[in-house]
Image (cartoon, coloured by chain):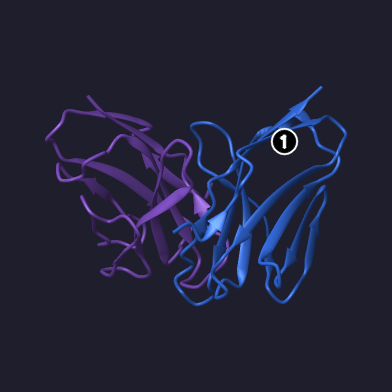
Chain colours: A blue, B purple
Amino acid sequence: DQQVKQNSPSLSVQEGRISILNCDYTNSMFDYFLWYKKYPAEGPTFLISISSIKDKNEDGRFTVFLNKSAKHLSLHIVPSQPGDSAVYFCAASVAGTASKLTFGTGTRLQVTL
Amino acid sequence: DGGITQSPKYLFRKEGQNVTLSCEQNLNHDAMYWYRQDPGQGLRLIYYSQIVNDFQKGDIAEGYSVSREKKESFPLTVTSAQKNPTAFYLCASSNRPGGTEAFFGQGTRLTVV
């Protein structure tokens, strides 16, 4: 049972445009959400997170939006740059449970020139 | 520099052999985790440890074993009982149980030949 879903396996965006990566979850106990970026043959690196008490968190070019009623979150990258090309994983956790992260299957973002 | 070190980066194993993957961290983190990544799938939790001398099974623990004798170290043994061991293995740590961001190592690619 996939509790965190990223339904788009890939996304292609032109440089300078907005990239929107989506993530849905089914477990209503999740209250902390994270986005990780991963290059091939490397470990994921933390990008941005959001607690369920917020609906938006911004860090530079990256903004995460959370819609709790829809159990949906999205990552916006503006403007997109070629170096953003990577696989992006959405992850969720329940606070106080040893930080066990449940990951989505990832979305491969390709930023083209 | 603080971080998580996984070794080796590439590992080949003959069928029927056990193999141990190393994970060391100097971040003074209490919690450590092992994940497995397969093509087209998200990261799946194998085992996690909240404190020294304690560890719990994750979602796919069968065929794996771990130990946590020191805070800095969390080795993973892939046993011959693991039916499909070829994968990319990632170790992570976080600063407290129930903590937020997990920091990942660079990963070990295990191939069974």
Residue density around tag 1, few if under 14, some if 14–19, many if 20 or more, within 10 Å: some
Amino acid tagged 1:
Asp
In percent of the image, x 13 and y 36: which residue is there? Answer: B17
In percent of the image, x 84 and y 41: which residue is there? Answer: A18
In percent of the image, x 62 and y 63: which residue is there? Answer: A33
The answer for which chain carries disc 1 is: A
Q: Which residue is mark 1?
A: A84
Compared with residue A74, is residue B112 higher up or lower down, i.e. above or below? above
Please indicate whether residue B82 sits to the left or right of residue A63 in the image.
left
Compared with residue B86, is residue A49 higher up or lower down, i.e. above or below? below
Q: Position of residue B51 (x, y in %)?
A: 35, 70
Q: Position of residue B29 (x, y in %)?
A: 46, 63
Q: Quadrant of residue B31?
A: bottom left
* Residue placed most toward the observer, A27 or A80: A27
Does dot 1 land on a helix, a strand or a loop? helix
Count the labels in the image. 1
* Residue placed most toward the observer, B71 or B55: B55
